[in-house]
Image (cartoon, rainbow, N blue to C red):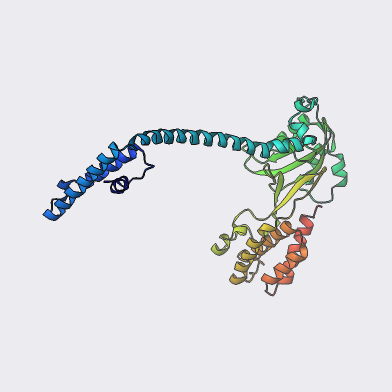
């Protein structure tokens, strides 16, 4: 018996520790125990021979002078594992702080002189922190004069003489809200930072019910100073403010009766269309430098619009009845084209799209009705 043969029999190497040798010996001696191979005499004799050689190899290794060196190797192996674990933890901590430095520390230093940096960290710049003013409704003056002199479109609110009389006089915010609560079932105001200069804009929301589920109109006010606000626009038809994107969403309601009627039943094929089954097209506004303008283009919706038009073209357009109404197909075309126009702001492109997918005899008349309602009811604001 030699060292190489003993290693081969026990299936270990000179680098294995004493624990590894003992574990391998236990597995092999258990595997080749004669009692497990007593099916016939030949297998039993083979198992006895293997067990004998395994015992000899194990006895040879445990009595060899290399056995003591295995003790030192086991100790070094355990110490090396501890060192590797501690090094990994230290390197992970260093890497974490390097990532923090790259993501936050370097931008923190680069934008040190930026006004936004001074706003967030005034103490680091020895800036005088402006105290939050107590918003007192009795001290806030509201003015409608400029808007009433310059507005150039029709507003349903201004068709009411009572409301016009209320708006014609300068008043405080408290007196205005008291008047609105008398006229409307519910109203509330909010101060929102919409402009790039981070000044607060006053928004008054008018509701038709006390639960504030149905929103009628928004009154949007810009400011002269901390205590004076003037009306810049009125958004009606259930306009809402998206506080995440800071955009106003105004539904286009003009096409709800477009060759259609409120009591008519929409065909199931139309009611399943996304652009027809929901609340209809919307106009997106944003507040910029004291003015209410259209938001940037949303061309990401064009593919969905074209796919819907393809479905409508395949389905076809039903003829109108004696009352000049149909099953809602022309209304679906109008709302989809309106949605495309107020996502791209290109009337020629919308016209080409309409004539490409609406190929029926009355296409000139339908297109003229669509354009007239868009231009008259929702003039473009740039």
Judge from the rendering whether residue 308 lies leftward or rightward of residue 370; answer left or right: left
Q: Residue at x 28, y 36 (%)?
A: 63
Q: Residue at x 37, y 33 (%)?
A: 71
Percent x, y of residue 99 = 63, 39
Splitting the image into 4 quarters, where does residue 305 fall? bottom right
Compare residues 66 and 23 and report the one nearer the observer.
Answer: 66
Residue 211 shows in the view: yes
Q: Residue at x 62, y 57 (%)?
A: 262
Residue 135 shows in the view: no
> Residue pushed farthest left?
41
Splitting the image into 4 quarters, where does residue 73 fall? top left
Judge from the rendering whether residue 237 lies leftward or rightward of residue 20; answer left or right: right
Q: Residue at x 75, y 65 (%)?
A: 349
Compare residues 14 and 115 and report the one nearer the observer.
Answer: 14
Percent x, y of residue 165 = 82, 38
Percent x, y of residue 94 = 60, 35
Count of number-bearing discs: 0
Compare residues 165 and 274 and report the one nearer the observer.
Answer: 274
Q: Relative to 308, does residue 80 appear above or below in the rendering?
A: above
Percent x, y of residue 123 = 76, 25
> Residue pushed farthest bottom?
361
């Amino acid at each position: 018996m030699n060292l190489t043969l003993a290693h081969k029999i026990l299936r270990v190497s000179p680098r294995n520790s004493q624990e590894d040798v003992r574990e391998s010996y236990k597995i092999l001696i258990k595997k080749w125990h004669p009692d497990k191979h007593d099916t016939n005499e030949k297998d039993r004799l083979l198992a006895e021979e293997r067990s004998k050689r395994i015992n000899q190899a194990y006895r040879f290794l445990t009595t060899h002078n290399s056995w003591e060196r295995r003790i030192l190797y086991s100790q070094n192996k355990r110490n090396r594992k501890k060192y590797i674990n501690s090094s990994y933890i230290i390197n992970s901590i260093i890497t974490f702080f390097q990532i923090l430095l790259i993501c936050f520390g370097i931008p923190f230093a680069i934008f040190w002189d930026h006004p936004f940096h001074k706003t967030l960290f005034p103490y680091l710049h020895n800036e005088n922190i402006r105290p939050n003013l107590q918003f007192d409704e009795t001290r806030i003056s509201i003015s409608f004069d400029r808007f009433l002199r310059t507005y150039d479109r029709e507003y349903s609110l201004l068709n009411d003489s009572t409301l016009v009389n209320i708006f014609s006089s300068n008043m405080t915010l408290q007196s205005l809200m008291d008047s609105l609560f008398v006229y409307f079932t519910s109203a509330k105001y909010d101060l929102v930072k919409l402009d790039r200069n981070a000044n607060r804009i006053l928004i008054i929301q008018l509701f038709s019910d006390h639960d504030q589920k149905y929103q009628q109109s928004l009154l949007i006010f810009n400011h002269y100073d901390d205590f004076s606000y003037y009306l810049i626009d009125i958004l009606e038809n259930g306009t809402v403010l998206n506080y995440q994107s800071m955009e106003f969403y105004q539904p286009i309601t003009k096409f709800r009766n477009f060759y259609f009627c409120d009591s008519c039943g929409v065909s199931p094929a139309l009611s399943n269309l996304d652009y027809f089954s929901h609340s209809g097209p919307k106009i997106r506004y944003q507040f910029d430098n004291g003015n209410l303008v259209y938001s940037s283009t949303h061309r990401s919706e064009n593919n969905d619009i074209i796919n819907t038009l393809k479905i409508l073209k395949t389905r076809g357009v039903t003829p109108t009845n004696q009352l000049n109404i149909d099953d809602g197909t022309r209304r679906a075309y109008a709302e989809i084209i309106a949605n495309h126009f107020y996502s791209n702001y290109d009337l020629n492109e919308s016209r080409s799209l309409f004539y490409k997918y609406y190929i029926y005899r009355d296409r000139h008349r339908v297109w003229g009705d669509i354009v007239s309602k868009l231009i008259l009811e929702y003039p473009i604001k740039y």
